Image (spheres, rainbow, N blue to C red):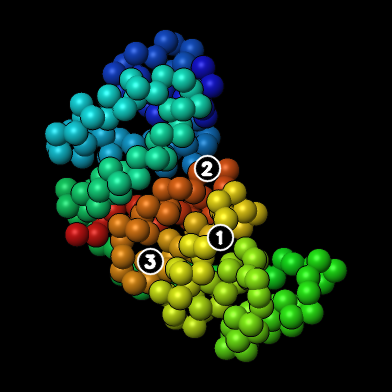
Amino acid sequence: MNIQENKVDFFDRFLRNELVEDERAVFEQKLQNDTSFKIEWEAYQKAVQVVNLMGLRAQLENLMEANQKPKQIVAHWYVWVPMAAAVVLMIGYFWPSQSASDRELFISYYKAYPNVITTRSTSNELTSALSEYSSQHYLEANQLLAAISPATDTVYFYRGLVNLSLSKSDSAISNLSKITPGSVFQQQANWYLALAHLSKSDRLNAISYLLKIKSSQFNFESAQKILVEVGKKK
């Protein structure tokens, strides 16, 4: 079995003690050697406990039974955002502990994304705007980016970051949300959208975007850490 493609099913079978000896050995080895796998396993255990308490176990099983193909299982695990977000928030009710405030989490994890656009591939207007951005002249950068028409995913992305740096969370969310699905900036946008919502103490939307960040994607481990912290909150 490919654990990465069947992770949810694999976790569930382990809980039901249905793994054969070889599979169990692989599972235990990954728990010891793979930090991301261990974090996901611990989060999954808590989620299942909460789901049971919430009386939603039957819904979880129905969702899993409806998606038997390996790739579909993983895909739908990330599509269950509303239920998963509720689960994370419920964890804080059943397992309360000390945690950082939303603002403290934002400050701890926010770091401006670098200018990765090469001069040859940009217009003079965008080059000037990104130069101001790199120099942390965010007001100037925002004015220059706002003047570029038509706006591209690059413009929306860096306008989002500029506004986030200026503590204008709503404007940041508005711009980042306009990025085309599948864009080269989509993974990064999910991370910064999560932080933008977190800066507003909008935990539900923050969790929704954090859950979209998969194990091979931008800032996955940081996303998992924030989910753990948010899960501690009442």
Q: Earlier in the sequence, mark 2 or mark 1?
A: 1
**Residue that appears at 40% across and 29% down:** 8
Query: Which of the image's four quarters has the C terminus?
Result: bottom left
Q: In the figure, is residue 170 to the left or right of 204?
A: right
**Residue that appears at 62% across and 89% down:** 140
Q: Nearer the viewer, mark 2 or mark 3?
A: 3
Q: Earlier in the sequence, mark 2 or mark 3?
A: 3
Q: Which mark is residue 142?
A: none
Q: Earlier in the sequence, mark 3 or mark 1?
A: 1
Q: Which mark is residue 197?
A: 3
Numbered disc total: 3
Q: Which mark is residue 179?
A: 1
Question: Which is nearer the eye, 86 or 178?
Answer: 178
Residue 146: in sight, yes or no? Answer: yes
The CA distance from mark 2 to mark 1 is 21 Å
**Residue that appears at 29% across and 18% down:** 16
- Residue 56 place in picture, x, y as percent: 19, 33
The CA distance from mark 3 to mark 1 is 16 Å
Q: Residues within 10 Å of mark 3 (few under 14, many from 20)?
A: many
Q: In what element is the residue under mark 1?
A: loop
Q: Nearer the viewer, mark 2 or mark 1?
A: 1
- Residue 45 place in picture, x, y as percent: 30, 35
Q: Amino acid at mark 2?
A: Ser
The CA distance from mark 2 to mark 3 is 21 Å
Q: Which mark is residue 215?
A: 2
**Residue that appears at 31% across and 27% down:** 63
Q: In what element is the residue under mark 2?
A: loop
- Residue 23 place in picture, x, y as percent: 47, 16
Question: Which is nearer the eye, 28 or 103?
Answer: 103
User: In the displayed structure, would residue 138 be above or below residue 214?
Assistant: below
